[in-house]
Amino acid sequence: MKIVNIKADKMRYQKNTSAYGLVLLSIVTSLVALFTMINYDTFSSGEGSMRVAPDLRVGLEIALAIVLMLTTFMAAEKVKYYDPKWSLIGLFVLAGVNFLRIFNLPVYAFNKGWIPAATMSIVMIEFAVTAGLLVLAGILSTRKVIILHKHMKELDAHGNDAV
């Protein structure tokens, strides 16, 4: 019996570039959000100049961003090769953490008077896009992992030379 599922069979030899690209793009949007906020300055002269001042919470957010960047890059590499744990769990956990970041530092910086409401909104949208990209990558990758694993089971059931 010959199994004809060319798309699923191609996945055995091709990388998961769509989910990989979305995860890498989420790293970029996360960095843009962080730099938009921590580098904000009105460049006005005098005491009334609005700018984010470094404190413990800002430092912790930067440290968290570095850890998230490294973890997200590792997730991208795992997803590229159809790793089920990172597709089914890892990307959604990273999306949740990035979703929580929406309400952390942007609101804190706004309440301290370091950034205006417009900048806070932009940063919140950028973090939301980051989380959305990770969720989308997770959905796409999970779908592909399920298809690939189903196909691999079919191949095992009929012998590896069934294609």
Image (spheres, rainbow, N blue to C red):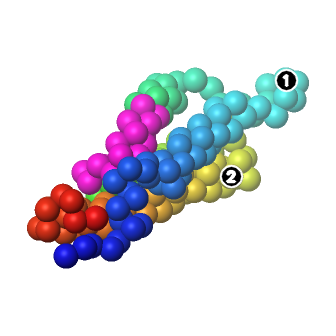
Query: Residue 130, can we see it?
Result: yes
Which quadrant holds the N terminus? bottom left
| Residue 25 x %, y % | 57, 46
Give the residue type that dot 1 points to: Gly
* Residue receiving disc 2: 122
Q: From the top left corner, tell me how far across and down residue 60 is, in percent.
A: 44, 29
Dot 1 alpha-carbon crowd within 10 angstroms: few under 14, some 14 to 19, many 20 or more? few
Q: Secondary structure at mark 2?
A: helix
Q: Is residue 131 visible?
A: no
Q: Which residues are magenta?
A: 69-86
Which residue is the site of mark 1?
46
Q: Is residue 50 left or right of residue 130?
A: right
Judged left or right of residue 40, residue 133 is left
Tell me which numbered mark, 1 or 2, is placed earlier along the sequence.
1
Q: Residue at x 49, y 25 (%)?
A: 59
Residue nearest the observer in this picture, 60 or 47: 60
Q: Residue at x 58, y 23 (%)?
A: 54
Q: CA distance from mark 1 to mark 2?
A: 26 Å
Q: Would residue 139 be counted in the magenta stretch? A: no
Looking at the picture, tell me which residue is in the foreground, 116 or 3.
3
